[in-house]
Amino acid sequence: MNIVLFGPPAAGKGTQAKRLVSERGLIQLSTGDMLRAARASGTELGTKVAGIMDRGDLVSDEIVIALIEEQLDANKTAAGFIFDGFPRTVAQAEALDTALTQRGMGVNNVIRLCVDDSALVNRITKRFAEEGRKDDNPESFKTRLANYNKQTAPLLPYYSAQGKLTEIDGMADMDTVSKSVADVLNANGHGQAPKKASFWSRLFGRA
Ligand code: ADP
């Protein structure tokens, strides 16, 4: 099961992705986290992307696609992936489809967390005060939101045309949002993996 968590910056994608990791044993692939890790360890890539990230602009498609492909290959036995903050452009979505197809997989579900702009601004203002993440400053956040609307929102028709998109209310509290995410996955036949085969599946040979 491969899930794309979709939504504007600060919509809560990271929080929900982490919950899915612990509940369903999926692997979270967050390009934002990967890029921050590259910066923290002072790699050439990290140095190259630092300014772009702090301004709130997108790093190149080429860079993030390479990071994702590297992780797909490093986790060949994974039960599935949660893509968080990727894809962010139509070119990235197309590259993801190609990369997954080449590996015998595909995107199964795209879940959009819908949050009002004013709520996003409030969340970011709070996070900036608490954590001091450089790109959470008001100017960079404005750029991130504008980039989302211009470059990332066009992915919605891309995925809805494929019948993969479900929208959920991201304004609710975290547990309610998690419940909505679980409902979407369960409705799409991705119930929580059973710890052990049920009586019926053993009897009929299928889960
Ligand atoms: P958020 O979802 O809160 O905006 P992320 O942690 O996903 O934050 O991303 C932080 C920054 O990392 C982005 O503003 C951008 O500069 C860069 N980045 C992350 N993912 C991508 C991506 N898929 N394509 C281009 N740039 C990305």
Image: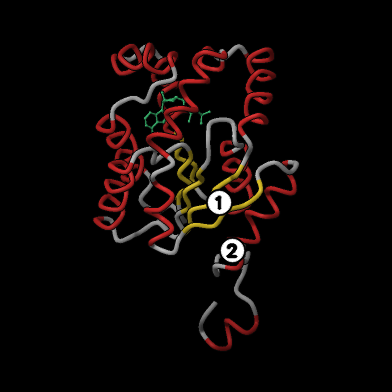
Above or below residue 35? Residue 24 is: below
How crowded pointer 2 is (Cα within 10 Å; few <14, some 14-19, many 20+) is rated as few
Q: Position of residue 120 (x, y in %)?
A: 63, 29
Q: In which quarter of the image is ligand 1?
A: top left
> What amino acid is at disc 1?
Gly
Q: In which quarter of the image is residue 108?
A: bottom left
Q: Is mark 2 on a helix, strand or loop?
A: loop
Q: Nearer the viewer, residue 101 or 103?
A: 101
Above or below residue 56? Residue 26 is: below
Would you say the residues marked 2 and 1 are in contact, meaning their CB atoms lie under 8 Å apart? yes
How crowded pointer 1 is (Cα within 10 Å; few <14, some 14-19, many 20+) is rated as some
Which residue corresponds to the image point at 63% horizontal and 24% vertical from the top-left? 121
Which residue corresponds to the image point at 38% horizontal and 41% vertical from the top-left? 87
Q: What element carries label 1?
A: loop
Q: Residue 193 carries which label?
A: 2
Which residue corresponds to the image point at 39% horizontal and 44% vertical from the top-left? 154
Q: Nearer the viewer, residue 55 or 117?
A: 117
Residue indicated by mark 1: 25
Q: Position of residue 183 (x, y in %)?
A: 65, 61
Q: Quadrant of residue 195?
A: bottom right
Q: Position of residue 62 (x, y in %)?
A: 24, 32
